[in-house]
Amino acid sequence: MADQSQYTISDLAYYSGIKPHTIRIWEKRFNLLSPSRSGTNIRGYGCNELKKLININTLLQSGWKISKAVNLNDVELDCEVRQLMMGKIDCPHTDFLINGLMVHMLKFDEIKFVEVLQNGFDRFGVKDTILQIVYPFLKRIGVLWQVNDISPAQEHFASAIIRRKLLQAIDAVAPAPRISGKPAFILCLPTEEFHEIPLLLAHYILLVHKLPALYLGASVPPEMAAQSALSTGSTHLFTLFMSASPMDKLKSYLSIIHDHAPELKLLFSGCPEMCKKPILNGAAGHVSNIEEFEQVVLRLTKEG
């Protein structure tokens, strides 16, 4: 990947975990970065600067001093980070664990990747590990990190392991029995939607709070989702639109479910801004994030 991407200092802070104020201090004190200048004198940073900041932050969180880390050249930085990641995990910082997932993904090291993920589960719990470690990791995969290229195979390798670990966590929680008239969920992704990790996390949260859920998985036709709800006496359906689906596709999917199961309460979430617009005159409610979903679940457990 050529070093053509331009990032603002806010972008650097987001991807590296280092505050903008700190980045500016390091620039002045250590001449750490070499930003370009736009015609209006706005600084822009490339992939090499981002990579260097991520590596330095990893070393700092393992106990290095900034005065020592900035004296390493790029090759030495890469080497030190890789050696650090291949050692024993004893650092509780989330950025350190995020970087660990990246390094082990790049090397297709399943044992070490699972070790980092399990370390997160043990330290932070399943939900917070997904929110604080896995989600940032997945968002950063597309950005230059330790090397100048990330293949689709590496992304699939990592996602498959995360999915498997989530399924193991789900299997470890006893399912709640369905009771007539009490809240019960259908969980599914719309047709041609395949990113299951957020939906699996929703399943885990429902189980932890002892609400029954029927998990249908990815790419579920709306008629099937509605029929499953009717057959099981489910009261709620939760789905996610992760891709930039056209508004008509979103409305159509929810409308078909509503037509077949008008008493079913529909909840949906996802990335597109359009998901925040009212749909079906209030018959479908938008959930901004998994924390908001959990608040809905908590209210239902109290009401039920």
Image: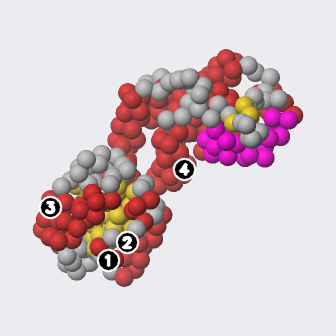
User: Is disc 2 in contact with disc 1, using a CB cutoff of under 8 Å?
Assistant: yes
Q: Tell me, for residue 22, which label it has, or none.
A: none
Q: Report how far apart the C-alphas of labels 3 and 2 lie in the structure.
A: 22 Å
Q: Is any part of residue 176 visible from this angle?
A: no
Q: Which residues are magenta?
A: 7-28
Establish if 174 lies above or below 14. Answer: below
Relative image position of residue 158 (x, y in whole percent) = 41, 34
Identity of the residue drawn at 81% across and 36% down: 26
Marks 3/1: CA–CA distance? 20 Å
Of badges 2 and 4, the one in the foreground is 2
* Residue type pointed to by label 1: Asn
Would you identify the image quadrant in which residue 82 lies? Answer: top right
- Which label number is shown at residue 223? 3
Give me the C-alpha separation between circle 1 and circle 4: 34 Å
Q: Residues within 10 Å of mark 3 (few under 14, many from 20)?
A: some
* Disc on res. 281: 1
**Which residue position is annotated with label 4?**
132
Q: Which residue is mark 2?
A: 278
Image-based side of 290 in relation to 36, left or right: left
Q: Amino acid at mark 4?
A: Gln
